[in-house]
Amino acid sequence: MDWPAFAVSLKLAAWTGALLLPLGLVLARALAFRRFPGRGWVEALVAAPLVLPPTVLGFYLLSVFGGGSPLGEAWMRLTGGPLAFSFEGLLAASLIFNLPFAVQPMQRAFEALPPDVRQAAWVSGLSPWRTFWAVELPLAWPGVASALALTFAHTLGEFGVVLMVGGSIPGETRTLSLSIYDRVQALDFQAAGLMSAALLGFSVAAIAVVHGLSARVGTRRG
C-alpha cells in the first residue's frame, strides 16, 4: 500500500465533500424548487463532467489553471506558487468534476418532497430558512448522504483529471489511482492489486449506501 498516496486521496476526498456540501445544497435546492430563465443550461453545465472525457476536462482545467492564464497568474502573485500541479489546483478541479455527483442526488431528494409539506410549514409561520433546516433538510437527508458517498468514492477513484491537473507529485498530488498506474507500469502487480482492492471496497460500500438511501427516498415518495 502506498500510504502517502492513500493519505492524499483521503484528504482530497474529504475536502471535496466538505466544500461541495454547501454549494451542492444551494444549487440542488434552486434547481428543484425554482423555475428561472436558463435553468436548462445550468443543469446542462452541472451535468457536463458526466459526459466529458476526463482527459478533455482535465486539459481545459489545466489551461485555466496554468501559469499563462489570468487565474494562474493571479494565484501566483497571491500565493507565490502555481495553481496547476498543486494540491489547491487539484482540489479546485475535484470540485468541478464532482459537481454532478453532489448536486443531482440532492436535487432528486428535494424534488421528491411533497409541496404541501413546505406550504404547511410556511402557514405555520416558519421562515424559508427555518423551513429548510426544520423540514426540508431532515426529509432530504438520504439524498444528501448519497451525494456525499458518491462524491467521496468518485474522488478516490478519479484518474484522468487528477493526472492532467495535478501530475503525480509524491505527497502533494499523487493519489492512490495514480500510484496504481505507476505500480502496473513497474510490473508490481501485487501492490497494484492490493490498492485496487481497497478502491473497489470503497466503491462497493458507496454504491450500497446510495442504493439503500435511494430505496428510502422511493418509499417515502410512494
Image (spheres, rainbow, N blue to C red):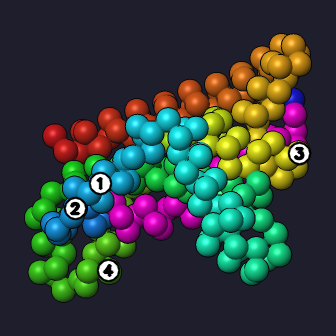
Q: Which residue is mark 1?
A: 43
x and y percent of residue 219 in the render?
24, 39
Type of the residue with mark 1:
Glu
**Residue 141 against residue 33 in the figure, above or below:** above
Which residues fall within the magenta stretch?
2-28
Type of the residue with mark 2:
Arg
Asked if residue 109 can be seen in this view, the reply is no
Q: Nearer the viewer, mark 1 or mark 4?
A: 1
Q: Which residue is mark 3?
A: 170
Nearer the N terminus, badge 1 or badge 4? 1
Nearer the N terminus, badge 3 or badge 4? 4
Q: Secondary structure under badge 4?
A: helix
Nearer the N terminus, badge 4 or badge 2? 2
Type of the residue with mark 4:
Arg
Q: Which residue is mark 2?
A: 39
Q: Which quadrant of the figure has residue 128?
A: bottom left
3D distance between C-alphas at marks 3 and 4: 46 Å
Q: Secondary structure under badge 3?
A: loop
- Residue visible at 87% across and 29% down in the picture: 1
Q: Residues within 10 Å of mark 2 (few under 14, many from 20)?
A: few
Question: Is 175 placed left or right of 155 in the picture?
Answer: right
